[in-house]
Image (spheres, grey):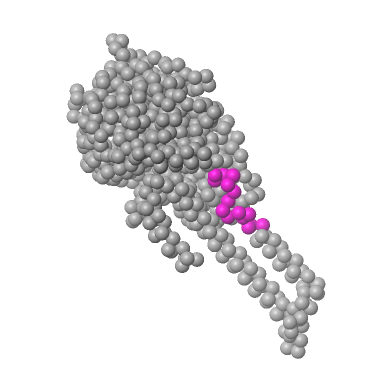
Amino acid sequence: MSGTREPFDPFLTKLLAAAGGKASAPIEDIKNGIEKIKTALHLARKWEEGIFDGFAALTRTVDQIIQEQPSVNDDSIKSQGAPLDFLSTENGKKLLASAAEKVEEMASKVPCDFQLSPTTSSPSSVSKEIPMNEEEFQCMAEKITAPDPGLTNLNIVYDYLDPQLKRCFLYFSAFPENKVIRRRIMIYWWIGEGLVAPTSNGRTAEHVGEECFKMLIWSNLIQPIYQKHSKTAKYCKIYPWARQMLVSKAEEYPENFFTFDQQDRPTFNSMQCERACLVAKEEKDQVAVTVKSKPNELRSLFNLSAQYLSCNKDQLASLKAIAALQLGRWQYLSRHHIEFTDTKFLEALQFLKGLRYLSLQGISRIIDLPETIAGLTNLLILDLRSCHNLENVTPAVTSINSLTHLDVSECYLLDKMPQGIGSMTNLQVLKGFVVASTRSRDPCRLSELTQLTKLWKLSIRIGSEVHIGEDLSELSKIESLLSLKITWGQMKSSPMKIREPKTMKGSAPLEITELKTSSNKTMKRSPPSQITELKTSRNKTMKGSGSMKESMVLAFSLLKLEKLVLECVPDEDSMSWLKPGGFRGLKRLYIAGGKLRKLSTVTENDGWNVEILRLKFLKELKLEWVDLKMKLRQLRCAQIYECPNILYSPSGFDDKGYWVRNDEDASSSSMAGTIAPV
């Protein structure tokens, strides 16, 4: 088998290079299909080996019993019919019955379809839009049709997984069934414990984790949840019948993978295993982070359901072997927040020298991190997302050279980033970078990010009263960038009143959350995708949440960029840099919110390779869908939502504003391509 497979990989590599951006969707389908087949063949080989071993043992047993019979051992009657004569005897019939039971037992373990049912692995069959309302989302997730558990013997599939995938799967035993689990949380956890790591051929640990996640989906062990018209599952849940098997396997694992109570909830018991979970029996219960015994052996601590926590510095400092510390929120929606009675426990982080993953996501009352955090010399991932009281990122963070992921997104009180981020040469993902105003003292500038040669994912927030000007063109020097998000928004320097925009019937209401700084100044924030007009306390109107008109930015190139998200764009000049020649690899373009009136940078230029387009909450944007579709000839999926001035035929769109290319559209687009100049 290996001899016939070897020539394929070079062929696929050449095919990808030759196709470039022209056939990325089919090529991705081919790659995914091949990986799925490899998974199936791997399981099939494992099962085949087990079956052959079983039959070999059975054959030896039968042969030995037959040879021990006197009639068979007698040389005078050894012939082809002698064994058959024996099998017609009483002992022979018992032997046949025993052999039949053995064969039936092996047959019962045969998975019906090693390629697995498309019911769970096809985006089209489980394609669901992730709604904004939690109850609606949970209801949707519970209604997803799951395959008959009889179709696949989960124990057999699990037994044939390689050791890495077995361990990856066991981490899911911590979660209740039917709860939505984010892929990113699981991958970060795996990275923290060293279960997935970078490869010698340049693949990052996160990409390796994504492949493991896919393998578990294709093995029918976890149930994927797809966003509408997406082929990539970013969320999943545990099959109801798989949960019990998971708990059993986790308890059977050497030294216990997790320990569970009588309700199969993971417990905080460091005396019996290397992993522990913080679980609140009642919603408002306060849970203390206390170590009963063997703190030096605890590798992972995960906050599963505790909203109110207390933590003693000495207790935390005793966790010398801790590698993954998830104290913050893991749930999908932001309504889940965490509160500590006192944040002084953060000072003990300096003693956790082996810590690789630290999540404080959604924890309130954290204003800053202590400078002693610089002592975490092995830290890879620092997640501060949605720490709404965070006002400052200590410069000590920039001395953690090992850091690959830094997330300070949705920290709306931050008004700058510390200088020195450019020296964090291993940084791959940076979310929430704040472009500060000229009045800020010693901020980090965009030009400093050009030193980050491994950075592939970046999101930035341009504050009010910030003239970004030509600084944005510095991004062209980050040649490794694959994903970029730019949000024009407000910061704490000028408290603002937000006027709620009108929404369509059935759309999610605008959430406004009150925040307070350390000086007790109250702020209100709103989802950036829905901000259309802001007013300062002096009643000066700022469009797109930017206080002044942006300077024209010259076009620049990011040839490898695949995804671009723009939120609250104040005017068309702010997008003047976006030209097709400099973004040939761009496949996904999302624009949401703001005061954008025209989209001439797209409609007046040819040569786009965009395949997925989303336009949302653009109430002043005027254009015609037909003209837009003619320019985006590679377009296969689009969404137009709450954009009342875009002219299009509703018959081609569903109730969520989605349009999907059909064969007729593809044919007309191809004809247009032969006529229109390029």
Residue 302, image quadrant: top left
Residue 271 visible: no
Residue 117 lies in the magenta-colored region: yes
User: If the image is split into quadrants, where does the C terminus sit?
Assistant: top left
| In front of the other: 115 or 661 | 661
Please state the horizontal and vertical placement of residue 512, each as a whole percent of the image: 41, 19
| Quarter holding residue 533 | top left
Left or right side of 228 for 599: left
Left or right relative to 124: residue 669: left
**To which quarter of the image does residue 292 belong?**
top left
Residue at image position (47%, 26%) is 648
Span shown in magenta? 108-122
Residue nearer the viewer, 457 or 266: 457
User: Looking at this view, is 644 or 69 the one in front?
Assistant: 644
In the displayed structure, 132 sits above or below 316; it is above
507 inside magenta stretch: no
Per the picture, the main secondary structure of the magenta-coloured stretch is loop
In the rendered image of this protein, does residue 169 appear above or below residue 383? Answer: below
